[in-house]
Each structure stands twice: as structure tokens, then as C-alpha cells.
Amino acid sequence: MGSVLIFGHNGQDGFYLSQFLSKMKVRSVGISRTSTKNGIIGDIADTDFVKRTIHKYKPTYIFHFAANSTIAHDAILENEKAINIGTVNILEGTKEFSPKTKVFIAGSALQFKNQNLPINELCNFDYSNPYSIARNHSTFLTRYYRDKFGIKIYYGFLFNHDSALRSSKHINQKVIHFVNNLQSNQQTSKLLINNLHYKKEFNFAGDIVKAIWMFVNQDKTFEMVIGSGIAYAIKDWVDYCFKSVKLNWEDYVVQDIHSTGREAILVSDPATLFGLGWKPEIDFYRLADLMLANKLF
């Protein structure tokens, strides 16, 4: 097997994929805008850089994880560059210099119109925020290049997955940091949570990259929901994390009653993925334990 290029190598998914490939003795090259150990510094939105890199390595696989995982409008230009220009750059470079390369583009559960029902690959797209718009555009780009030029492009709609590498802007890690700060007497304020009853998936990033690898190593389907289909309430996460350190969450957590939305659950219908034989190994409780201990595995 030739090399593997991972754009967005410094992120959570890039890290876990590179670790997984290393264990399988598969050589990967990480690419990030910032410093990366044993990798390349470069911007996925730089067309010449991306094309030169693909021309140099002619990789067996390319993985595109580069993005700012936020629905905030402030990130609209950043995500248009990373998600859409980045996708075009990769696909153009692949078409011109390495047409036999398999390409994986990371998508999101947030691309779909959420009607509080399990979501699969055939559900309708949403356009309620700039992040979903950017992701949906990248989906259409992959369909165009796949149909027009015959490139094997895999698009994975990733449902929530976490690890100790998550930033504290994500609710799972926000809770973890709060609890750990309480333990070290560094926390004085209350923890504000928008909706304790909102349900979502709590998958482990290490499991998700294994699903992605399984996905790109088959040729029957090229768009797939990637998740466990198992949802828990935010309250369940809060309760378990606080109990783990023998504290009562109700003494420290405040719910913002003005932030509750219409959506009550965001959960996948992973029947297509499960048909490949994938199942998660790390459950909700083990994930919390790993993150509380700041352990990667």
C-alpha cells in the first residue's frame, strides 16, 4: 500500500486515524495549517499546495477532516475555505494527478433536517446554519466528481464523537473540565447548560475512525451515516461525570431555560454501516472515564 494523506491532522479525527494506521503499519502523512509532528504544514485552501502534495505522494487514500466544528456565523468564511475550497482542491488534485486514489470527505449529522427521528443517508438536508450549508455543498461536490470523473469518493456523515482531545467548546468536554476543576478547587462559578434533556450520541473518536476505514475499503456504497444509533441525554453525561467524583450535579449546574430548542434528539440510523460489520467498542461510560482521566485510549 502507498501513502495516506490526512488533511486536518492536528484535529481529533486526524490524530486517531493516524494512530490506527500506524498500528496497521500503514504510512500516513499528516497535513495541518499549524505545526504537526512528522507531518507537513500547509493550508487545504491553498490550491497550488494541495495539488503539489497530491502530485508528490500519489496516495492510496486521502482523508479530509479539516474544518472548524461550529455552527457559529463567525466561522462562515473559515469553513467555506476549509470545507468547500478544500474539497475542490483535493478532488481537482486527485483528478489531475492521482485518479486511482480513494478520497474520504468528512461530513456531519448537522447536515440533515432533524425531525427528532433516526437519521440515515436518505434523509433531507438542512440549511439552517452556515456549517450545514458548507457541508451540504461539499456533498454535492463529491457527487459531481464521482459521477463525472469516476473518482472513488466516500462521504461520511459523522455523528457526535469525542475523546480527551475535544476542545472545551463542546459540551462533553465542557462538563469534564468543570468537574476536574472542582476536584482541584479551581472552579467557583456554576456550569450553565442549554438543555439538559437534549439527546445525542456519545461515540468514541477511536471507534469512528475504524468505521471510516471500513467504509473506504468497500465499493458498494459511497455515502454513509457514521454513528452508533445510541443516544443519551446531556443530563445522563452530567450525572455520571459528577457521580464519578462523588458530587451532586444539581449543586453546580444551571440550565438556561431560554436556550431550549425544538430539537430533542440527534441520533443516527446506522443500518448501512452496521451492514459492513462495524460496531462501537467504547460505550458511553467508558468514554466518560477516559475523558475524566484525560486518557486518549
Image (cartoon, rainbow, N blue to C red):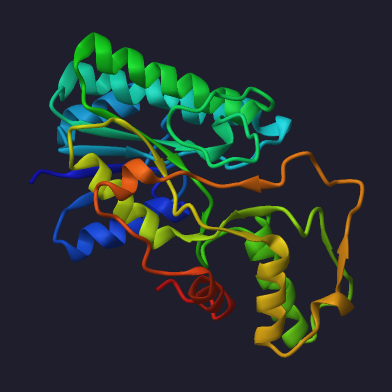
- Which quarter of the rendering shows the C terminus? bottom left
> Vertically, is 263 above or below 185?
above
Name the residue at 7% across, 46% down.
Answer: 1
| Rendering quarter of residue 64 | top left
Please give left or right for residue 71 compared with residue 137 in the image. right
Q: Image height check: is 200 above or below 107? A: below
From this viewpoint, is residue 39 visible? no
On the image, the x and y values in percent for residue 110 come to 58, 36
The structure residue drawn at horizontal position 22% and vertical position 50%, both measured from the top left corner, is 28
The residue at the point 33 percent across, 28 percent down is: 49
Q: Is residue 82 visible?
A: yes
Question: How many marks do you count on the picture?
Answer: 0
Side of 276 relative to 155 (left or right): left
Q: Nearer the viewer, residue 130 or 115?
A: 115
Question: Is 79 in front, or is 256?
Answer: 256
In the rendered image, the vertical position of residue 23 relative to residue 226, given as above or below: below
Q: Position of residue 284 (x, y in %)?
A: 53, 69
> Where does residue 268 sit, x and y in percent of width and height?
50, 45
Establish if 22 lies above or below 247: above
Residue under the image location 68 percent in, 60 percent down: 233
Residue farthest top in this picture? 148
Q: Position of residue 139 (x, y in %)?
A: 43, 23
Viewed as shown, does residue 138 lie left or right of 98?
right
Q: Residue furthest right?
A: 258
Q: Is residue 117 left or right of residue 209?
A: right
- Outermost residue on the bottom side: it is 246
